């Protein structure tokens, strides 16, 4: 028995090219969505870091009867003192995407901020804030000012 020309196995060049085009289209659609997902997940991680930072500030006030002194520098804004809380997020990773800072503090109140680090994929996504009274803000449009529609961390 001899094999005919049409019974040989394998793919033709045309079939391979069509498969590559289909994979390329799927990648072109999926990759931006994946990148947006990563940006959102890093922002969620920064929100968690800010909430843990709040806990650290409350612990500091319990021990010192004031929020003053939790900052690393004597002026504001300032990163937190290393013994109070880490100065970057995520706290459990070597790759950092947000700088954490104390924007203002006095004996009875504070404002904490997570600012995207320049040169990371988070750049241009706006800073996150939380106050000692629990008010959460997000500068979604990254214009440096919290507007009326930016008074929560929700998308």
Image (cartoon, rainbow, N blue to C red):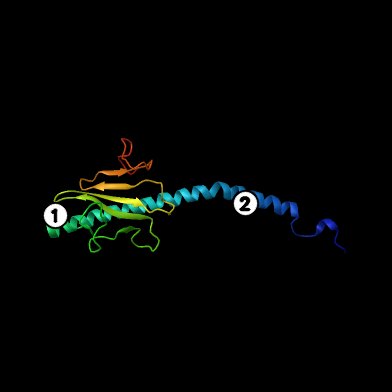
Quadrant of res 154: top left
Q: Quadrant of the N terminus?
A: bottom right
Rendered image: mark on residue 143: none
**Residue name at image x 30 percent, y 43 percent:** 137
Return the disc, 2 or 1, that comes first in the chain's sequence.
Answer: 2
Q: For marks 2 and 1, give the one nearer the viewer.
A: 1
Q: Is residue 149 above or below residue 53?
A: above
Q: Position of residue 75 (x, y in %)?
A: 21, 54
Q: Position of residue 113 (x, y in %)?
A: 29, 50
Q: Mark 1 sits on what residue?
A: 66
Left or right, 69 with reference to 150: left
Identify the residue at the far front of this view.
75
Left or right, 88 with reference to 65: right
Quadrant of res 69: bottom left
Q: Position of residue 47 (x, y in %)?
A: 32, 51
Rendered image: mark on residue 23: 2
Label 2 SS: helix
Left or right, 77 with reference to 154: left
**Residue name at image x 41 percent, y 50 percent:** 123
Identify the residue at the far top of this view.
148
Label 1 SS: loop
Identify the residue at the far left of this view.
65
Q: Position of residue 26 (x, y in %)?
A: 59, 48
Q: Is residue 134 above or below residue 85?
A: above
**For the residue carrying disc 2, how many other residues have a C-alpha within 10 Å: few (<14), some (14-19), or many (20+)?**
few
Pick the front one: 3 or 95 = 95
**Residue name at image x 14 percent, y 57 percent:** 62
**Residue name at image x 69 percent, y 50 percent:** 18
Q: Alpha-carbon distance for marks 2 and 1? A: 59 Å
Identify the residue at the far right of this view.
1
**For the residue carrying disc 1, how many other residues have a C-alpha within 10 Å: few (<14), some (14-19), or many (20+)?**
some
């Amino acid at each position: 028995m001899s094999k005919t020309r049409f019974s040989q196995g394998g793919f033709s060049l045309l079939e391979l090219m069509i498969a590559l085009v289909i994979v390329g289209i799927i990648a072109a659609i999926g990759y931006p969505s994946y990148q947006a997902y990563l940006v959102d997940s890093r922002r969620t991680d920064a929100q968690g870091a800010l909430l843990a930072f709040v806990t650290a500030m409350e612990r500091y006030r319990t021990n010192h009867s004031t929020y003053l002194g939790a900052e690393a520098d004597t002026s504001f804004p300032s990163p937190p003192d290393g013994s109070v809380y880490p100065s970057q997020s995520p706290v459990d990773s070597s790759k950092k995407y947000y700088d954490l800072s104390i924007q203002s503090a006095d004996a009875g109140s504070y404002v904490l901020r997570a600012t995207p680090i320049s040169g990371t994929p988070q750049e241009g996504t706006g800073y996150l804030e939380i106050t000692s009274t629990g008010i959460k803000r997000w500068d979604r449009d990254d214009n440096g000012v919290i507007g009326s529609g930016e008074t929560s961390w929700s998308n």
